[in-house]
Structure formats: structure tokens, C-alpha cells
Image (cartoon, helix red, strand yellow):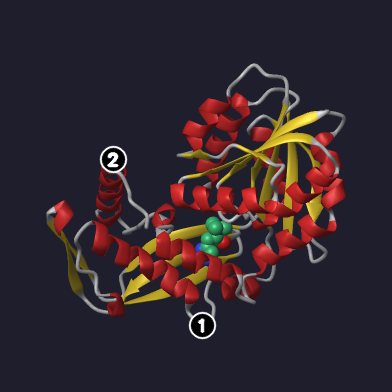
């Protein structure tokens, strides 16, 4: 059971207040991942329409040695740090290979969820008894600060799963710049990007016929009901996903099917929704190669090596500080 601290809950309440008093109304996808949300996301990763996980997994299983070689690149040891590790399935493929190669390395999964970190650690201890694992729990930015050290042991930071897609372009740039500020010249950043493709393929991935993605979005309303003592009636909302090819952006919304008022007791107020009013829930940015190059150069990196899947659906890109 996830127990959030009162500081986290206050932050959540503040963000919900800010979002529901904004025009247009919005809620942040960073709050999707309570226990039920994390479970639903695992279910999404197994859906045939959600190609992202499979594409990245294929890159990891089919190009393991090339990824290993690019990470090591002459170093005799490294610290592998994963931001937002989740269930670590993809990383397990790399770790298994690194151990087989007898590389001297540590693995530091970092996640905002203590529960996710504990579960990952238990599973990896079991699966890889020789692995040196040092999990960090907390916000990405706090974890980054703890990485600022003078050690010249090579650090490879991984940010997989196209998690970067949930950031606006501006936030993504800010994030990469703050990573850049804690890296040494010999360190590397390894990022998973979901590429621009047939818009229909993208829309299907975010609007699956079983409605798992709809449930994943609606679950945030349930979380607000539970944690902030609200009365959202989930049956009065429907999930809507779209893709805008000119911006390469997939967005999802919850649409109020009727005119209604919702009360959030923890905020001591009510919010009115018009019939068909949309609450903006999530951006899942897709990328062109030019966008990736621009992000890298604007944040002080150069692209060193890239790993594509065979459909060119997805890229794992290795960046070097410049
Ligand atoms: C975890 C952010 C990569 O945007 O594709 C999946 C979350 N949202 N289905 C994504 C998500 C709807 C996912 N990321």
C-alpha cells in the first residue's frame, strides 16, 4: 500500500487546485502512478497496441552487446543510474549481460515510488545475487543533486520508456540541462525516444479498445476522490486521445459528458464543468530526428550513438557532454 507523506499530499492538493482553476482545466500525469495506476500502466505495456515497450525491449535484446560496448567504451568500471526505473524489465537484459561480461559496475535505480523501488530491489537481489544495487527514492531533481561528485568513475544515466515524452519541450530542455550540470566529461546519458510515425498507430496506442488507457486516466479522478475527499463521478467522464502530427504530440483528455459540479473537500471548494468541457491529462511527445538533435545540442550534449528498432518506431540515444 502506498502511503504518501503530508508534504506530498499538500503538493498534490496544490497542483490539483492550480490545474482545475486553469483555463483549460488540467491535471498532471505525474500523479497517475498510485498503486492502481502503476498496475494499470503495467497492463498498458502488455497491450498489443502499445508498441513502445516492445520496440525498446527489442533494441535491448537484439543490440545488447553494442549497447554494452558503447556504455563501457574503454572504461574499466561504471555506475549505471536509472531515472524512473519502474519494474526494470528492460534494464534486467543489460544487467544480465554486464554481469556475464564481468564488468565492475553498480546499479542505482531511482524512482519516486518507495514501493516500486523496494519491489525492484527484492526482485533483482533474487535474480542477480552478485549485482551491487543501490536504489534511490525521490524526485529526479533531488537524485541528480546527489550525483554531483568529483569521482571520475564513469556514470551512465538512463531515462528509458519515452518517459521524457510527458515533459513539455521547455521542461525537457530544462531537465536535460540540469542533468548536464551534474555530469563529467566522461559520463553519458542514454534516453529512450518514441519517434513520429503513422498517426493512426499512435492514436491506437493511447486509445486501446479494451479501455485500459481510459481506466488509467480515470484512475487519477479516483485518486483525487480518495486522497482529497472529492466526489468525481467517473461515469460522467470519457477518455479522448488525439495526435497532432505537426507538433508530434499525442494528448489525452477526460471529457465531461454533462454539465456538472465537483466538490473537493480537502480544497474546500467546488469546480464547475460545462457539458463537453475537456480536462487536459497528458502529453506523450513523439520526436523527429531533428528534434532529438536540437534537444541534445541546446542542452550541451552531442549524440554519440543511436540504437533503432527495425521499424524505426523508437530510438535509444546515447549522449556525450560537450
Ligand atoms: C510512461 C510516459 C512513457 O506516455 O506513453 C501510457 C504513459 N500514458 N499510456 C506514455 C502512458 C498512456 C507513457 N509513459
Q: Residue at x 25, y 79 (%)?
A: 258
Q: Position of residue 240 (x, y in %)?
A: 44, 73
Question: Front-most of 169 and 209?
Answer: 209
Q: 135 left or right of 58? A: left
Q: 137 left or right of 54? A: left
Q: Is residue 101 above or below residue 151?
A: below
Identify the residue position indicated by label 2 in the image: 7
Q: Residues within 10 Å of mark 2 (few under 14, many from 20)?
A: few
Q: Position of residue 284 (x, y in %)?
A: 54, 59
Q: Nearer the viewer, mark 1 or mark 2?
A: 2
Identify the residue position indicated by label 1 in the image: 210
* Image region (quadrant) for ligand 1: bottom right
Of the two numbered discs 1 and 2 on the same chain, state the one appearing first in sequence. 2
Q: 126 left or right of 59? A: left
Q: Position of residue 82 (x, y in %)?
A: 62, 42
The quarter of the rendered structure image containing the N terminus is bottom left
Kindly indicate the quadrant of the structure image that contains residue 233. Answer: bottom left
Q: Residues within 10 Å of mark 1 (few under 14, many from 20)?
A: few
Residue 32 seen: yes
Q: Position of residue 286 (x, y in %)?
A: 62, 57
Secondary structure of the residue carrying tag 2 is helix
Q: Is residue 242 above or below residue 189?
A: below
The alpha-carbon separation of the residues under discs 1 and 2 comes to: 36 Å
Residue 167 seen: no
Question: Front-most of 127 and 50?
Answer: 127
Q: Residue at x 66, y 64 (%)?
A: 52
Q: Is residue 188 above or below residue 205?
A: above
Q: 240 left or right of 151? A: left
Amino acid at each position: 500500500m502506498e502511503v504518501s507523506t503530508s508534504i506530498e499530499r499538500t503538493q498534490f492538493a496544490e497542483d490539483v487546485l492550480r490545474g482545475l482553476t486553469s483555463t483549460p482545466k488540467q491535471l498532471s500525469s505525474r500523479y497517475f502512478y498510485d498503486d492502481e495506476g502503476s498496475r494499470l500502466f503495467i497492463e498498458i505495456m502488455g497491450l498489443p497496441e502499445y508498441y513502445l515497450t516492445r520496440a525498446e525491449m527489442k533494441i535491448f535484446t537484439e543490440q545488447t552487446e553494442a549497447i554494452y560496448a558503447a556504455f563501457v567504451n574503454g572504461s574499466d568500471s561504471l555506475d549505471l543510474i536509472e531515472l524512473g526505473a519502474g519494474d526494470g524489465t528492460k534494464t534486467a537484459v543489460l544487467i544480465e549481460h554486464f554481469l556475464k561480461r564481468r564488468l565492475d559496475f553498480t546499479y542505482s535505480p531511482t524512482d519516486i515510488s518507495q514501493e516500486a523501488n523496494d519491489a525492484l530491489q527484492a526482485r533483482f537481489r533474487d535474480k542477480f545475487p552478485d549485482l551491487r544495487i543501490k536504489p534511490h527514492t525521490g524526485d529526479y531533481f533531488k537524485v541528480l543533486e546527489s550525483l554531483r561528485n568529483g569521482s571520475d568513475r564513469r556514470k551512465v544515466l538512463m531515462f528509458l520508456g519515452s518517459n521524457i515524452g510527458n515533459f513539455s519541450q521547455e521542461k525537457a530542455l530544462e531537465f536535460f540541462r540540469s542533468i548536464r550540470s551534474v555530469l563529467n566529461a566522461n559520463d553519458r546519458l542514454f534516453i529512450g525516444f518514441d519517434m513520429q510515425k503513422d498517426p493512426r498507430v499512435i492514436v491506437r496506442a493511447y486509445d486501446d479498445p479494451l479501455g485500459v488507457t481510459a481506466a488509467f486516466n480515470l484512475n487519477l479522478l479516483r485518486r483525487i476522490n480518495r486522497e482529497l475527499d472529492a466526489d468525481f463521478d467517473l461515469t460522467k467522464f470519457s477518455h479522448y486521445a488525439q495526435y497532432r502530427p505537426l507538433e508530434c504530440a499525442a494528448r489525452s483528455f477526460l471529457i465531461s459528458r454533462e454539465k456538472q459540479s465537483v466538490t473537493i473537500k480537502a480544497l474546500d471548494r467546488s469546480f464547475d464543468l460545462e457539458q463537453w468541457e475537456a480536462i487536459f491529462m497528458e502529453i506523450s511527445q513523439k520526436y523527429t530526428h531533428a528534434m532529438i538533435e536540437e534537444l541534445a545540442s541546446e542542452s550541451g550534449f552531442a549524440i554519440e550513438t543511436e540504437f533503432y528498432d527495425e521499424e524505426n518506431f523508437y530510438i535509444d540515444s546515447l549522449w556525450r557532454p560537450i
